[in-house]
Amino acid sequence: MRKKIVAGNWKMNTTLTEAKNLTSELKQLFSNDIKCEMVVCPPFTWLTTVSENLNNSPIKIGSQNISHQEKGAFTGETSVAMIKEAGATYAIIGHSERRSLYGETNEVIHQKLIAGLSQQLNVILCCGETLEERNAGKLEEILTAQIQLGIGEMSLEYLPQLVIAYEPVWAIGTGLTASPEQAQEAHYFIRKLLSGIFGETAANNISILYGGSCNASNAGVLFSQSDIDGGLIGGASLKAQDFITIAKSF
Ligand code: PGA
């Protein structure tokens, strides 16, 4: 059985007060019928507070990015050791906003992947095509490059910490959710790629999350697809009740 995961990517949103309120509400609304792993990924500055607030709660903490460098003269960067000390056990890497707005390449994303995995983080590796790429028939080519180069040389011992998120860029923050069939098709293709890298049994144990305008109304049908193991949720993770409803959608 693959782990079911619902992770909230808060992006560059929330004041400190809002972050505290959101986590308190999540803690209150959490109930034992939630069978998936819930993760919240607040901005770096609130990691410590959020993790203190979620102390004694099963909800896990993640960062939205990490540096591939260990420490030193890297102005503006945040290391794996720092986010771990702040309470994070997950990190999102290679989000399309990092790729398109901050020039992250598959090569640097691979270095981040190894930095996170080798320091015991669970890493959510994002991939996904733009609308132009999809329309040009390049979906498989793009996913192949992002998965194969992003994973690169990776020790099998890290497999239990690896999570993939398929996020079609055209669906992120647009309200244009991929149809369950489109999402399932891409997830199935990603699992085949993983199977080529790690073998079928290992690939069948890797959770693949869907992201891109996933919300409380469409999560159920998306999560019922055979290769969709949960979601990476942006906008809808900023509303506690919606995020909890999504987590209960399995
Ligand atoms: P969205 O964002 O749910 O707001 O579309 C998802 C993401 O970017 O991770």
Image (tube, grey):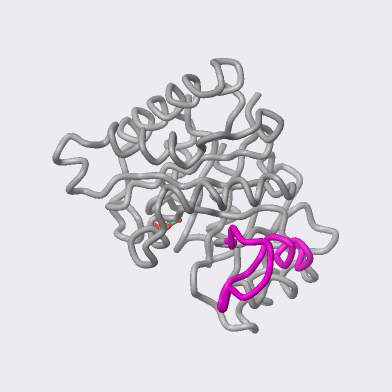
Measuring 48% from the left and 39% from the top, which residue is drawn there? 220
Depth check, front residue: 225 or 140: 140
Q: Is residue 106 left or right of residue 201?
A: left
Q: How many marks?
A: 0
Q: Which residue lies most toward the left here?
A: 136
Q: Nearer the viewer, residue 76 or 95?
A: 76
Quarter of the picture containing the N terminus is top right
Against 43, residue 194 (above or below) is: above
Q: Position of residue 124 (x, y in %)?
A: 56, 47
Magenta part mainly helix, strand or loop?
loop
Q: Where is residue 75 drawn, in percent x and y?
A: 57, 78
| The magenta segment | 66-87
The residue most toward the right is 56
- Image quarter for ligand 1 equals bottom left
Q: Is residue 51 left or right of residue 223?
A: right
| Up-down relation of residue 144 to residue 112 (above or below) | above
Displayed quadrant of residue 181: top left
Residue 157, image x, y percentages: 71, 31
Q: Residue at x 74, y 62 (%)?
A: 81
Determine if the magenta segment contains residue 71.
Answer: yes
| Residue 18 located left or right of residue 29 | left
Q: Locate residue 163: give its quadrant.
A: top right
**Residue 244 percent coordinates (x, y):** 60, 54
Q: Is residue 122 left or right of residue 138?
A: right
Q: Is residue 155 within the magenta segment?
A: no
